[in-house]
Image (cartoon, helix red, strand yellow):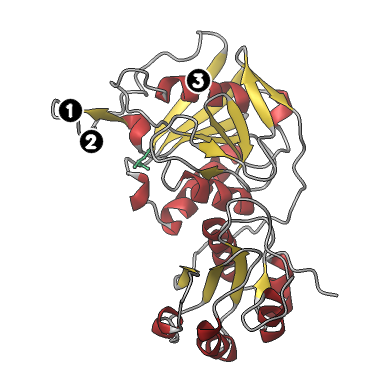
Amino acid sequence: MKTILAIHTGGTISMSQNEKGEVVPNDENPIAEEQVILKGQINLITDEMFNLPSPHVTPEVMLKIKQRIMKAIDEGVDGVVITHGTDTLEETAYFLDLTLPNTIPVVLTGAMRSSNEIGSDGLYNFRNAIMVAATDESYGKGVLVVMNDEIHTARYVTKTHTTNVATFRTPTFGPIGIVTQNKAKYFQELIQTEVCDINHVVEGVYLIKAYAGMDGSLFEAINNKNTKGLVLEGLGAGNVPPKTLPAIQSLIDNGIPIVLVSRCYNGVAQEIYDYQGGGIQLGKMGTILCQGLNGQKARIKLLVGLSDNMHGDELREFMGNAIS
Ligand code: ASP
């Protein structure tokens, strides 16, 4: 029988609605009490590690979860499920994907409706996540996110709706599998990437989104020695308004790595346009193009790379820009 560790961290999945209709955290986790798996099927062990709404989750919390999973791997568990608030679930999932050895299935899940609401999805998602973590085919797929009968990679999944239970989507590439009749079925493979076994996390890594008519003010505001890196969500394929350019150049001149992604929901950032502020010009200025990740994930990746002491060409290659 497989042993699966469930790490609870908080979020709506462990909250309840009060008499006024407000969704609030509980002292006792309501789903930890429930019998979600048939006796004798799986040996489920539980760690109530945190009880945080996910906007309270920080990279330090992510690192503690990573360290807890490393311990569980050493102890011989067969898989790990993490329950987590959905707001930042994709960031924790991707942090773990970048920092854990790809040895046992690690699956994150959450809920859009709290534990006592009609149509609550928490227990269902939790049960599915356990089944996916206990499936042999889930080995070697990186960290996974299981919600609403779909299996997504941590690398590309994103929360797309504020309240709908079908909120988690993988734009451009799609989910890699589905959960059906309590079993995981896979239809795609994930390209393997490098793992960074970090034991601390740097601060001062920011995310800024470009918009029509933008000037350099936001870039100037972070141009100081505490800033370690910046992810810039550019327009379209990865372009910015021309008035931002002097401030961007000044950050680059001060040795602050700037990673360029697109603010578009679908597609990847590319160096296509050769006009003032176009992607080609940004590349010549020294920005690092990161293809396929959204802004919040590129920020997690940059933070992990910097925490692993990467600089210059090594960081550029890690962020997805092959050196020619
Ligand atoms: N705001 C909640 C959280 O992220 C949302 C959820 O869990 O679904 O903690």
Mark 3 vs 2, N-terminal side: 2
Which amino acid does the dot numbered 2 rest on?
Val
Residue at the spot 73% in from the left edge and 71% down from the top edge: 271
Q: Which residue is mark 3?
A: 127
Ligand 1 within 8 Å of the CB at mark 2: no
Q: Quadrant of ligand 1?
A: top left
Mark 1 vs 3, N-terminal side: 1
Which amino acid does the dot numbered 3 rest on?
Arg
Answer above or below: position of 306 versus 242: above
Q: Secondary structure at mark 2?
A: strand
Q: Residue furthest right?
A: 324
Q: Which residue is mark 1?
A: 18
Answer above or below: position of 227 versus 85: below
Which amino acid does the dot numbered 1 rest on?
Asn
Of tags 3 and 2, which is closer to the observer?
A: 2
Residue 292 in the figure: left or right of residue 82: right
Q: Which residue is mark 2?
A: 24
